[in-house]
Amino acid sequence: MLVNIGQLLTLRSDRVKAGPRRAADLKELGIIKDGALLSQGGRIVSAGTTKDARRDPWLRKNRAKVMEIDCAGKVVIPGFVDSHTHPVFVGPRLVDFEKRTEGASYEEIAASGGGIRSSLEAVRKAPKSALAAKVLAALNEMAAHGTTTAEAKSGYGLTVDSELKSLEAIRDAASLWPGTVVPTLLGAHVIPAEFQGRSQKYVDAVCKEMIPQAARRKLAQFVDVFCDRGAFTPQETEQIFASAESHGLSVRAHMGQLSQTTLEPFLRFNPASFDHMDHVSDSDIAQLAQHDTIATLVPGANYFLGLEEYPDARHLIDAGVPVALATDYNPGTSPTVSMPMAMSLACTHMKMSPAEALAAATINGAHALRLAGRKGSVEPGKDADFAIFAVKDYREIPYFFGADHCSMTVLNGVIAGGE
Ligand SMILES: [Zn+2]
């Protein structure tokens, strides 16, 4: 039981509509002052005030059995749900990083052999155990920053064997981490060099080998496609989505990072999320406002690429599109595991309010992974996922950027990290 919580952000509110949070509902944090939170067996039992918890007859009787943590006025939030990460890689891309400081663009670096393709060789060669160790290290670092649920994509192998190996590494790391991991097959990240000019052959490998095997072996819950200039075309993306659907896997996609793609034709596949969304048309925004597909914004990528433009979060939110925030943790464009940093960028560069950023990083992230029944808010019956921040006011979380103020994270009832 946590007591003396300065602000307990439950994100629970009777005022909000069911489903992903849209428009004004994104600001509803359900804050309880001087809060208390009881969990048992990995589930939240109750959330209320410390005063009420002290009066509770069951708690009075069972005090000796309850482990009490005095939060001394700190802030408690639902654990972050980081719904977009690429943790299966071996090393950082320091040469690309340096080149970028000299003015090279994302596409210039990719054309000169850097970018996603430069991570392939190391992942193809690495033993599964080495990849799993990398993934686990990233998950632990995420937990230290308040994340309790993470989506994890493959996508740096791009052969049938190395993509399946990457998914196995995610599974093995997840089995050693107390939080929740959602695995995604991103075999369609880029066309690997050996398939240059024969992209249909590679799409066939994704559709006829990777997806069926990942589905049969239950190694992935989602199939993702990088649909953009220089990656996969809308037609190829539809083929891959159709294959995923026929094998019982849900879909999500990287969309609109470099160029605008018309989103409407994909909606029949009921994608969980479209991610990046730097370039999106007004008519697609109007469509998305009528659907539960989440627009997942990853401002860490814009920041790290040194871009001046960020996704137009204000337009999306005000139009009624449900927006989530994620880190896009990856070695090329967003090497951060910090959801507080993503929130800070959302506030400073996308004009989201701290409250909107917090809800986008928790409950709407849970919707983006189709886990909102269990994750993303502090409510009785949900999983005991929460993070304690050593601040007095939740707005300090995005305000003090670049610092980790998370002092304890509880993942499915298990304490990780700590001061
Ligand atoms: Zn990504």
Image (spheres, helix red, strand yellow):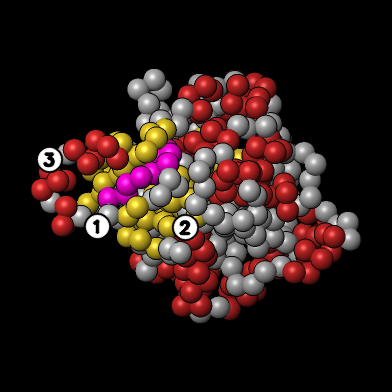
Q: Which residues are magenta?
A: 1-11
Q: Residues within 10 Å of mark 1 (few under 14, many from 20)?
A: few
Q: Is residue 316 left or right of residue 164?
A: right
Question: Is 323 or 280 nearer to us in this picture?
Answer: 323
Task: Name above or below for residue 378 compared with residue 69.
Answer: above
Give the camera-side residue of 315 and 244: 315
Q: Secondary structure at mark 2?
A: strand
Give percent across and percent down for residue 99: 84, 64
| Label 1 residue SS | loop
* Disc 1 target residue: 67
Q: Is residue 295 above or below residue 391?
A: above
Q: Report if residue 310 is visible in the image.
A: yes
Query: Mark 2: which amino acid?
Result: Ser
Q: Residue at x 14, y 46 (%)?
A: 60
Q: Looking at the image, which residue is at 60% across and 32% down?
A: 353
First in sequence, mark 1 or 2: give its number.
Answer: 1
**Against 69, is 96 above or below?**
below
Residue 317: percent from left, percent from top:
59, 26
Q: Residues within 10 Å of mark 2 (few under 14, many from 20)?
A: some
Task: Find residue 411 and report its horizontal and vertical position in percent.
Answer: 36, 56
Residue type pointed to by label 3: Pro
Rendered view: 9 above or below 65? above
**Dominant SS type (magenta):** strand
- Check mark 2 vs ligand 1: CB closer than 8 Å? yes or no: no
The residue tagged 2 is 407
